[in-house]
Image (cartoon, rainbow, N blue to C red):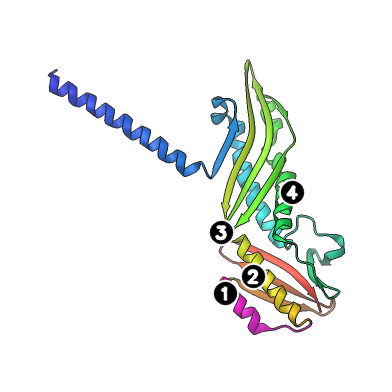
């Protein structure tokens, strides 16, 4: 083979390697804000437990977002603020002349509680133990931050994983979900404030204004047998539905 042809071949190999390196770096920066894990062994990065944990954190968060919205911002609605209507339970946002809507900080904690209660059953570590993994787990704690068009989740879940002679440790997982969850909260708060200004009155034009402002559907249904107005703030695209009632 001639020297020129050999050089061209080497150059081609270097170009391919360079492209692969750049691709890996680009993918890292794309996905590092979406899902990350911190541990003490690179072997964990490709483990089935790691993959399942990340999947479950994401899916449980999305389930929790819908559930918390339906519950008016609660994982468990306080008994004193709860209305049970047939099979549904919704919170009072206005009762006995006072507002009782949960703060955003409270809603973030409620979402974290939902994830904390349901994440472990999704991961189902017993399945991996049947495959020869020996797993020691610590306490799971979850914190959430709701911002414009995004919800960020941090889960601290220490897992010591042993198989054969190899031992690895997982500890911290992070994910973020694109969501207009905060907009539904803000629209609901605005509807509540409008009602609070004139209790007992239902201003349909006011609801239409809120609906157009947030590009959401706002419905109000008087329930005369319960002496309340049932409000629903929803988005058909994201399938989120924020519900609450006010006392008439």
- Quick one: label 1 or label 2, which is nearer the N terminus? 2
Which residue was labeled with disc 3?
149
Residue 219 against residue 51 in the figure, above or below: below
Decide which of tag 3 and tag 1 comes sooner along the chain.
Answer: 3
At label 2, counting other C-alpha atoms closer than 10 Å, the crowd grade (few under 14, some 14-19, many 20 or more) is many
Give the numbered dot on residue 113. 4
Residue 20 in the magenta stretch? The answer is no
Q: Kindly indicate whether the residue at mark 4 contacts the one at mark 1 (C-beta within 8 angstroms).
A: no
Query: Of residues 241 and 130, which is closer to you in this image?
Result: 241
**Sequence-wise first label, 2 or 4:** 4
Of callouts 1 and 4, the N-terminal one: 4
Where is residue 50 drawn, in percent x and y? Answer: 60, 33
Q: Residues within 10 Å of mark 4 (few under 14, many from 20)?
A: some
Distance, label 3 to label 1, CA atoms, is 16 Å
Q: Which residues are magenta?
A: 200-214
x, y percent for residue 228 = 80, 76
**Relative to the observer, which residue lies in front, 121 or 218?**
218
Residue 34, how many percent across, how many down?
A: 54, 45
Q: Is residue 88 left or right of residue 156?
A: right
- In the rendered image, the quadrant that contains the N terminus is top left
Residue shown at 58%/36% (left/top)? 37
Badge 3 local density, few (<14 within 10 Å), some, or many (20+)? few
Position of the C terminus, as image quadrant, is bottom right
Give how far apart the Cα atoms at labels 2 and 4 are: 24 Å
Q: Earlier in the sequence, mark 2 or mark 3?
A: 3
- Distance from label 1 to label 2 (Cα)? 9 Å
Mark 3 in CB contact with mark 1 (< 8 angstroms): no
Mark seen at residue 62: none
Checking the image for residue 187, the label placed there is: 2
Mark 2 lies on a secondary structure that is: helix
Which residue is denoted by mark 1 in the rendering?
213
């Amino acid at each position: 083979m001639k020297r020129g042809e050999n050089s061209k071949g080497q150059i081609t190999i270097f170009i391919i390697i360079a492209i692969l390196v750049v691709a890996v770096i680009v993918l890292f920066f794309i996905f590092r804000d979406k899902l990350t894990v911190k541990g003490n062994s690179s072997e964990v990065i490709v483990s089935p437990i790691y993959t399942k944990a990340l999947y479950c954190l994401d899916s449980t968060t999305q389930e929790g977002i819908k559930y918390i919205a339906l519950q008016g911002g609660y994982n468990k609605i306080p008994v004193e603020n709860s209305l049970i209507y047939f099979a549904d339970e919704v919170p009072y946002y206005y009762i006995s002349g006072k507002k009782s809507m949960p703060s955003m900080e409270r809603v973030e904690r409620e979402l974290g509680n939902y994830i904390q209660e349901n994440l472990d059953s999704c991961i189902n570590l017993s399945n991996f133990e049947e495959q020869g993994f020996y797993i020691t787990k610590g306490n799971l704690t979850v914190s959430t931050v709701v911002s414009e068009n995004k919800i960020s989740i941090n889960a601290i879940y220490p897992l010591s994983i042993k198989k054969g002679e190899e031992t690895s440790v997982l500890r911290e997982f992070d994910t973020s979900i694109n969501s207009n969850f905060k907009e539904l909260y803000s629209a609901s708060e605005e509807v509540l404030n409008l009602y609070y200004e004139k209790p007992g009155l239902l201003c349909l034009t006011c609801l239409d204004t809120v609906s157009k402002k947030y590009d959401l559907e706002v419905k109000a249904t008087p329930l005369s047998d319960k002496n309340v107005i049932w409000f629903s703030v929803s988005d058909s695209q994201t399938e989120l539905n924020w519900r609450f009632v006010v006392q008439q």
